[in-house]
Image (cartoon, rainbow, N blue to C red):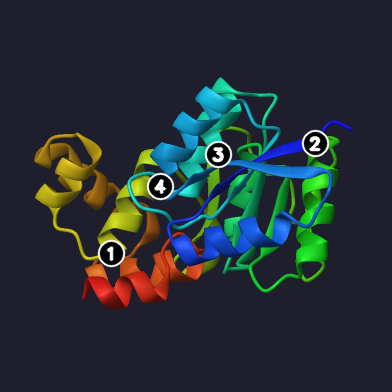
Amino acid sequence: MKKITVVLADDHSVVREGLNALLQAESDIRVVGQAETGVQAVKLVEDLHPDVVVMDVAMPLLNGVEATRQIRQTAPDTRVLILSAFSNPACVEQVLALGAMGYLIKKTSVLILAKAIREVYQGNRFLDPSITPPPSAKPGHAVLPAGRNAKKVVDLSPREIEVLKLIAEGLLNKQIADSLGISTKTSEKHRYSLMEKLGIHDTAGLTRYAIELGIAEPAAVASAG
């Protein structure tokens, strides 16, 4: 019997190891690799060609939103299943719009996780039972509600999402530039663009927005501070 090959992508090793141990009990699922950053997840998919990637949204270097976009472009046969601590509708809509086949909340049971892996492997969309299916989003963009005006819809580019996550983690413009391999001037432009699009003009507000959106975890933000 062919086993469904899986890559686990989460920046917490205890989460990855726990999922790996739980999935070992499933006779038709085999974990073939683990990644702690979005960059590693994309590289492992290129090297291993897994059937499914189980991916967190908030990860260093490259968040799960952008990693999903890259994987869908470079490895269209690999299915992406998001496993996140957040159930924010905008976060769900982002990754589904970029090609993810499923979205689960981390408090889900291993039975649901295994079922979701099997479903997305078969090409079926699978959402956590607690999630209301979002409306279709425009392909190629992350569709987000504006920070202080929930009725307004804003398109953020994958790069802007990366910058927003790093801002929430406490990085300054030069540190963001170094992390993403861009100039400090470009980093400053992305920060200004975020503030203008979202109508949020302070770092604390951007940080709160990133947490609400689900691309930055409160624990990571607290430790960065």
Which residue is disc 4 drawn over?
A: 37
**Tag 3: residue type?**
Thr
Occupied quadrant, residue 120: top right
Where, quadrant-wise, is the N terminus in this rendering? top right
Q: Mark 1 or mark 3: which comes first in sequence?
A: 3
Dot placed on the residue nearer the N-terminal end, 1 or 4: 4
User: Can you see residue 71?
Assistant: yes
Residue 3 image label: 2
4 vs 2, front mark: 2
Q: Pointers 4 and 2 in contact (CB under 8 A)?
A: no
Name the kind of residue labelled 4 in the image. Thr
- The residue wearing badge 3 is 68
Amino acid type at circle 1 is Glu
Mark 2 is surrounded, within 10 Å at the Cα level, by few (under 14), some (14 to 19) or many (20 or more) other residues, namely few
Rendered residue at 61%/25% (across/down):
49
The answer to whether residue 157 is visible is no
> Of residues 14 and 75, which is closer to you in this image?
14
Mark 1: give few (<14), some (14-19) or many (20+) Cα within 10 Å.
Answer: many
Dot 4 falls on a residue whose secondary structure is: loop
Q: Identify which residue, 94 or 144, lies in the foreground.
A: 94
Callout 4: few (<14), some (14-19), or many (20+) C-alpha neighbours within 10 Å? Answer: many
Q: Nearer the viewer, residue 158 or 200?
A: 158
Q: Distance between the Cα atoms at labels 1 and 4?
A: 15 Å
Residue denoted by label 1: 169
